Each structure stands twice: as C-alpha cells, then as structure tokens.
Image (cartoon, rainbow, N blue to C red):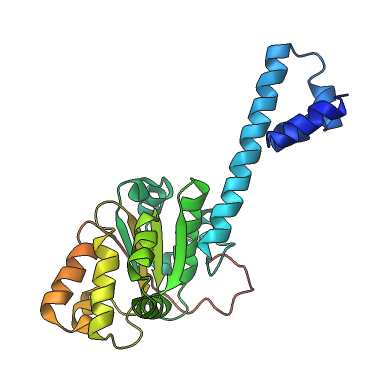
Amino acid sequence: MIDQKTIEQLRNLRLDGMLGALNDPATSIATAQLTFEQRFALLVQRETDWRDGKRLTRLIKNAHLKVSSASMEDIDWRASRGLDRSVMSDLASGDWIRHGRSILICGATGCGKTWLSCALARQGARMGFSVLYTRASRLLQELHVAHGDGSFNKRLAKLANLHLLLIDDLALSPITASERSDLLEVLDDRVGTRATIITSQVPYRDWHAWLGEPTMADAIMDRIVHGSYKIALKGKSLRDQEPGAAQ
C-alpha cells in the first residue's frame, strides 16, 4: 500500500498511468514475485500506455472526423468496390503521411468515400499524426471569412502544420476566383511535406475543367495529382447498411 504523500506526488507529477497501476490490486498480485527492476519497468510501461491512449483520444477528438468509428480493419473488401488490398496495406503503414503524399478518392454518392477517408485518417491519428477533417465548402468559406477578420495567414499556418488534412466532397459546386486562390495557398503549403486526402464525386481528371482558369488549374492539379494515390470506388450505395457498418 502506497502512502498518501506518494500518491499526491505522483498526481502532481501527472504520472496518472503509474498511479493507476499502483492502485490496481490485480497488478499488485501479478507482480508480487517480480524484482524491483521488473516492477519498475512495468510501471513505466503502464505510464507510457496511459499517455499514448490519452494522446490518441486527443488526436481523434481534434480531427473532427465525420465517421470517427471508421477503421482500416473494418474495410469492406467486396470485389465490386475496386479496392486493391496491396495498396490499402501500403497505406495502412502510414509511410504516405511521413512522405507528404496525397490520396485522391473518387466515386458516386454513397459508395463509401467519406468512410474510407476517415478510416485512413483515423489510422494516421493512431500513429500519432495530427489530423483534421473538413468539407471543401466549409474550408473555403472559413478562409473567405478569415480574409475579412485578418486571420487568414494564421489560419493557413495552422493548416500547414497538420500532418494530414482531409478535404471531403471537392467540386460539388462552382468555384470562384478567390476560392481557387485560397485552395492553391492551402495545397502549396503541403506539397511534398504534408499529407492530404481529397474525396470527390467528380473524377480527378475532370477537376481541371471544374477549376476553370487554366493557369491556376494547372498549378493546383500539379500539387495534388503527381505522386498521389488514386482510388476510384465503384459499386452501389452503401448507405442502406446498418449505422456503423463497415464500408
């Protein structure tokens, strides 16, 4: 039994994982025959596990994923969807995030683009990467507001610092000249250094036409298409499945 003073010291040092292990009767019984060094190593491991769990919870919360329960382990591998197991296995490793690469996911409404993108993003968070989900329309609107209140540069810097930015539903509506410029600014900060996922109902080959102005369109496409993973989802809508079902 540890005394109250030691408990308070552990709390003040924010060693909550270690404190939890010391207060766990099952742990005390299991470690009774261990040496001091072995018991101390176990306490350190419990503290590490606790901190890792707390950090993951914070990363998932800050990501604002539309489908926070989406997981790579729950991917629907039906052949009709067009998913390549070897590609998804490669993406599960997280190397694409470390190398600042993009993933472009296209497909019809309800085919699982958002679910899959959230599963990939959640996998990144599980590896300790900072993640943010946003709809394309919301992102462009927020940047428009940021121009007006003087926070545009601060907002850009915050986005640039994210390890992974998930932009959902690109090209759903016409884009204005100022929105094109803002989108280029966001993507230019990320090319080669930070990872990006973009989903769209429109095939990426048609994004150039959607962007409109040829020079700007070339610049934007150059930053997201070259060296990116391209996933074209197929099949009928999956939205009739039970809530939370794998997609």
Q: 95 or 7, which lies in front? A: 7
- How many numbered circles does the render carry? 0
Vertical order, 134 against 30 (above or below)? below
Q: Residue furthest left?
A: 215
Closer to us: 11 or 119: 11
* Residue 106 seen in this snapshot: no
Up-down relation of residue 218 to residue 42 (above or below): below
Q: Give how far across and how far down residue 82 sits, in percent.
A: 37, 66
- Residue at point 55%, 78% (across, down): 239
Q: Which of the image's four quarters has the N terminus?
A: top right
Quarter of image, res 174? bottom left
Q: Position of residue 55 (x, y in %)?
A: 58, 47
- Residue 194: quarter of image: bottom left
Residue at image x 12%, y 79%?
A: 214
- Where is residue 89? Give x, y as percent: 41, 49
Q: Residue at x 49, y 46 (%)?
A: 128
In the displayed orientation, state which residue is furthest to the bottom.
174
Left or right, 20 with reference to 61: right
Q: Is residue 94 visible?
A: yes
Please identify the residue farthest to the front as the structure is shown.
150
Work out whether residue 174 or residue 30 is closer to the camera in this orientation and state it. Answer: 174
Residue 50 screen position, x and y as percent: 66, 39
Please give left or right for residue 185 compared with residue 114 in the image.
Answer: left
